[in-house]
């Protein structure tokens, strides 16, 4: 009964964080609700607290498969989704699609606010575990490592979206109300340190057979992506090679199995909150009427596929009516009675593309093409020749990555940005401008903390 009481107390604390904070940076919890030693007095309640952080990651973060997550938002921002929400634009989604974002855009504000609220909760968890007098070191280290991994995911995405950002590891109110922006490269270095720390305590095996908790490979993948951002291509190659050669993970040759919860390619996935409930992604992208009320896959994306590409046939669904045809992402197929799909966060295909990109930027195009052809062969399309130049190889990599990862957690935006290719959006996005490489800092946050000034260029 005491354990149940403490867990309810913790859930209440997190719910307060999620709903009542005036500012994402300016948050502080009463001492009797968060960080108290009682919450971390035994391993079961502490693991329950960690599970709540994962639940927030699935349901109330930028990584959610809902329409407010990166998968939808950044697909509209680039060239993967076409928005039909111009009339009902309370969330500012049509402005995102139209590349006419203002600093008060509700959806962009949500990306910032939800991230810092979750980072605050993670910092409180790390502090609570670290200061606990009841947990031993062998219990503490893996728990902190998993929390550091979560925090690193938030920061690594935020820094790519906004550039220089506040980086905080405390829950101290006075510090957080006046926090200054940390330069982009320094944030990446701090993330690198956290992930290296995390790697020392994460297990190489899985805590549970369904891969719903991240293991060491998840931290390796995130760190490999971090090295790409820092242009440390040799280190990115080394880490991604560790994952692609790991016997726990296999590139699924049957494309219909990739998004099933028993896929051998999955590194980390999130179980729906209730048995039988469909993934957020299935509910977000599915539609059965024309024209759709929210969004559909862009015609440019559809046209990028060869007609015999198995991804076009299996991961995309056509909906016709009133002499019009639209398409939606159909990677997750179970709209109801879901028994075999979880939301995938990391899959081994991402490690392959880190490896491909790191090889290209080290001028090893022949080896990179070999790995690109693994995906083309699996998709049943023609193979690339070994004679491609570096520039041609980057172009093919970006096209192949889009066909592999469309509508998945902002891959398209991050890939184009990392390779200095965002300008190609000019061809299909009339309002695209160079300064759109960064999102604007939320107007309300700047009004609360002048240290966030100046605003990102052009906004």
Image: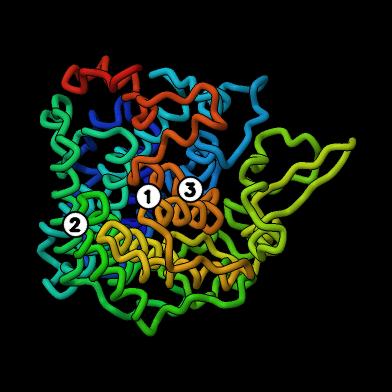
For the residue carrying disc 1, how many other residues have a C-alpha within 10 Å: few (<14), some (14-19), or many (20+)?
some
Residue at figure coordinates x 19%, y 51% from the top left: 191
Which of the 4 quarters of the picture holds residue 278? bottom right
Q: Cα distance, mark 2 to mark 1?
A: 40 Å
Label 2: element kind: loop
Quadrant in which the N terminus appears: bottom left
Q: Are marks 1 and 3 in contact (CB under 8 Å)?
A: no
State the residue in front, 369 or 236.
369
Q: Are marks 3 and 2 in contact (CB under 8 Å)?
A: no
Which of the labelled discs sits on residue 320, or is there none? none
Residue 159 position in % (x across, y down): 27, 40
Query: Residue 45: in sight, yes or no?
Result: no
> Which comes before the other along the chain, label 3 or label 2?
3
Q: Cα distance, mark 1 to mark 3?
A: 19 Å
Q: Cα distance, mark 3 to mark 2?
A: 29 Å
Query: Residue 402: in sight, yes or no?
Result: yes
According to the picture, the residue beneath numbered tag 3 turns out to be: 64
Q: Is residue 112 above or below residue 338?
A: above
> Which comes before the other along the chain, label 2 or label 1?
1
Residue at figure coordinates x 80%, y 47% from the top left: 319
Residue at figure coordinates x 41%, y 37% from the top left: 422
Residue 369 position in % (x across, y down): 42, 67
According to the picture, the residue beneath numbered tag 2 turns out to be: 232
Mark 2 vs mark 1: give the one in front.
2
Q: Is residue 71 above or below residue 294?
A: below
Mark 1 vs mark 3: give the one in front.
3
Describe residue 347's horizontal placement relative to residue 367 as left or right: right
Q: Is residue 225 above or below residue 264?
A: above
Label 3: element kind: loop
According to the picture, the residue beneath numbered tag 1 turns out to be: 11
Describe residue 452's horizontal placement relative to residue 103 as left or right: left
């Amino acid at each position: 009964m005491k354990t149940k009481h403490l867990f309810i107390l913790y859930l209440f604390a997190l719910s307060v964080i999620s709903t009542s904070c005036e500012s994402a940076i300016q948050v502080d919890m009463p001492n009797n609700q968060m960080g108290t030693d009682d919450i971390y007095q035994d391993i079961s309640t502490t693991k329950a607290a960690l599970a709540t952080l994962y639940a927030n990651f699935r349901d109330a973060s930028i990584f959610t498969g809902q329409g407010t997550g990166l998968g939808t938002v950044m697909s509209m921002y680039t060239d993967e989704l076409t928005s039909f929400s111009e009339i009902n634009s309370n969330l500012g989604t049509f402005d995102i699609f139209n590349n006419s974002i203002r600093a008060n855009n509700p959806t962009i504000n949500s990306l910032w606010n939800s991230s810092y609220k979750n980072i605050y909760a993670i910092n409180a968890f790390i502090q609570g575990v670290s200061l606990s007098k009841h947990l031993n070191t062998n219990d503490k280290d893996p728990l902190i490592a998993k929390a550091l991994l979560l925090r690193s995911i938030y920061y690594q995405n935020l820094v790519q979206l906004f550039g220089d950002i506040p980086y905080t590891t405390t829950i101290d109110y006075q510090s957080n109300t006046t926090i200054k922006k940390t330069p982009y490269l320094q944030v990446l270095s701090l993330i690198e340190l956290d992930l290296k720390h995390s790697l020392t305590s994460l297990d190489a095996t899985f805590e549970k057979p369904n891969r719903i908790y991240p293991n060491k490979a998840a931290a390796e993948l995130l760190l490999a992506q971090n090295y790409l951002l820092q242009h440390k291509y040799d280190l990115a190659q080394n880490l991604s090679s560790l994952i692609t050669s790991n016997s726990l993970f296999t590139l699924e040759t049957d494309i219909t199995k990739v998004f099933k919860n028993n896929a051998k390619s999955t590194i980390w996935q999130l179980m729906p909150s209730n048995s039988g409930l469909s993934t957020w992604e299935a509910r977000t992208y599915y539609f059965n009427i024309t024209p759709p009320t929210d969004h559909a896959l862009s015609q440019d994306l559809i046209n990028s596929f060869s007609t015999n590409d198995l991804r076009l046939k299996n991961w995309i669904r056509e909906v016709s009516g009133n002499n019009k045809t639209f398409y939606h992402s159909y990677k997750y197929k179970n709209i109801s009675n879901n028994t075999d799909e979880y939301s995938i966060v990391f899959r081994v295909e991402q490690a392959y593309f880190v490896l491909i990109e790191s090889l290209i930027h080290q001028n090893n195009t022949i080896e990179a093409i070999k790995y690109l052809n693994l995906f083309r062969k699996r998709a049943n399309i023609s193979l690339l020749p070994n004679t491609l130049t570096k520039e041609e190889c980057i172009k093919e990599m970006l096209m192949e990555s889009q066909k592999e990862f469309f509508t998945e957690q902002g891959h398209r935006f991050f890939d184009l940005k990392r390779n200095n290719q965002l300008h190609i959006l000019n061809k299909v996005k009339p309002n695209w401008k160079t300064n759109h490489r960064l999102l604007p800092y939320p107007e309300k946050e700047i009004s609360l903390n002048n240290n966030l000034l100046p605003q990102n260029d052009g906004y």
